[in-house]
Amino acid sequence: MLQKEEINSYNKRHETVHQRSLDFLSEKLAHQGVDIEGIINKTRYFQVAVPSWALGTGGTRFGRFSGGGEPGSLEEKIADVGLLHALTASCNAISLHIPWDIPQDAGAVKALAAKHGLLFDAVNSNTFQDQSGQGQSYKYGSLSHTSAIVRQLAIDHNKEVIDHGMALGSKALTVWLSDGSCFPGQQNFRKALSRTLESLQQIYKHLPSDWKIFIEYKPYEPNFYSTVIQDWGTSSFLANQLGEKAFTLVDLGHHLPNTNIEQIVATLMMQQKLGGFHFNDSKFGDDDLTTGSIKPYQLFLIFNELVEGMTSGDPEPAWMIDASHNVKDPLEDLMQSLEAIRIAYVQALLVDRVTLHEAQEANDAVSAQNILQDAFRTDVRAIVAEARRVDGGALDPIGVFRAMDIRKQLIGQRGEKAIATGL
Ligand code: PSV
Ligand code: MN
């Protein structure tokens, strides 16, 4: 566990330069009539969950190159997210994937998380892999399977995941299905979708009254011809059929190239049906790269719609990072994502919405573009750093992580060959 004093001592080295950047920005924004304190406060409250499976080095089907010192147990995963939260003050929750992370003693796990200032975000079910000893196989699907016995197995698993989540204080279940087909004609689209709906209805009945269910969509992979829940329209259809506790979950990597994700966000929010959000970035497919590393302007445009929705009173979705890749230290990667997310959020908060709406009503595309790009081109890193500092985090989280040789310490404790459970 990192001590606040250690972080403070590193912060001291950056204080002068940080304060100058903040003063400069504060003066600039004051001219625009923006209250920087209000923005800093909103930033502090913007917390993003970290998934338990992003703490190890991701792999591809061609290999996995562990960096060592990865968390081997749920307790170690909680410690890693606690460390991230201590450094960044921006990820106060962990999202578990069952059965990768089954809490043996929920009370003790909850207490450990609380010690790190962490809550439990949505719990995720896994019916895309067979578990050892499982009587039936998900090779040809789970909630959509042609066999009622396999469907029941998958339904029961989701109910168990809800039970685990209840014991930890989670309030949502995320369902992502890999169900689909690899060849034309292999699956009857209509039957597969209606069986999925019926299975989800069984799971929905098991949800406590204050819970939500998030339905995640994805166009392809691991199936390469069709996916049962392939897009936001299918997810939204299912959510509407299920009822008021069901919502769509948008994962940024789950779109075909050039899809207008910001428009999807606006459409779902308008219907109060955007429940969850998974951040990552990609060049081609579901690449699970660091958020903001490839398309920061797209991320900003998405946040522009999210902020537009939230300022219109739409409910705030549950935020989570869903990324893991091959070459970076996973903790450093997550710190980069957390920073990129808050930067895009702050930039979206800076958009002069009144003037933008006027430009839109007047069909003034030039002004509208200028308003958006003025906000996008503002360097808001001092605001993001200040929000961290006020909450006891580091002005330069990756700098502290490296200066303290934290990865080396983790390798010392857990070993060079420690590989996290997950994909
Ligand atoms: C699927 O690609 C996904 O985005 C879902 O959220 C899964 O639960 C997660 O990745 C981990 O495999
Ligand atoms: Mn996801």
Image (cartoon, rainbow, N blue to C red):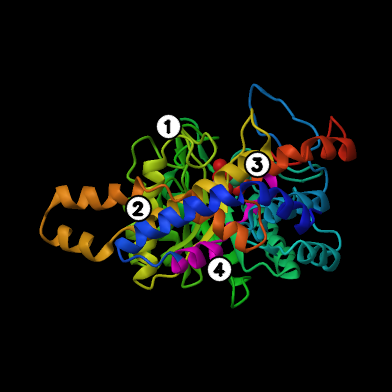
Place residue 166 in its image quadrant: bottom right
Front residue (pair 308, 332): 332
Pointer 4 residue: 212
Q: Is residue 214 above or below residue 231?
A: below
Q: Nearer the viewer, mark 1 or mark 4?
A: 4
Pointer 1 residue: 184
Q: Residues within 10 Å of mark 4 (few under 14, many from 20)?
A: many
Pointer 2 residue: 264
The Cα–Cα distance between marks 1 and 4, rounded to whole angstroms, is: 34 Å
Q: Residues within 10 Å of mark 2 (few under 14, many from 20)?
A: some
Q: Nearer the viewer, mark 1 or mark 2?
A: 2
Front residue (pair 92, 121): 92
> Which residue sits at x=65%, y=52%?
394
Pointer 3 residue: 398
Q: Nearer the viewer, mark 3 or mark 1?
A: 3
What amino acid is found at the position of numbered circle 4 in the picture? Lys
Q: Quadrant of the C terminus?
A: top right
Q: Residues within 10 Å of mark 1 (few under 14, many from 20)?
A: few
Expressed as whole percent of the image width and height from the top left, the position of residue 216 reads: 51, 52
Q: SS of the residue at dot 1?
A: loop
**Residue 44 painted magenta:** yes
112 sits to left or right of 276: right
Residue extent of the magenta highlight: 37-55
Q: Nearer the viewer, mark 4 or mark 3?
A: 3
Place residue 235 in its image quadrant: bottom left
- The mark that comes first in sequence, 4 or 2, is 4
Q: SS of the residue at dot 2?
A: helix
Furthest residue in direction left, as rendered: 362
349 sits to left or right of 146: left
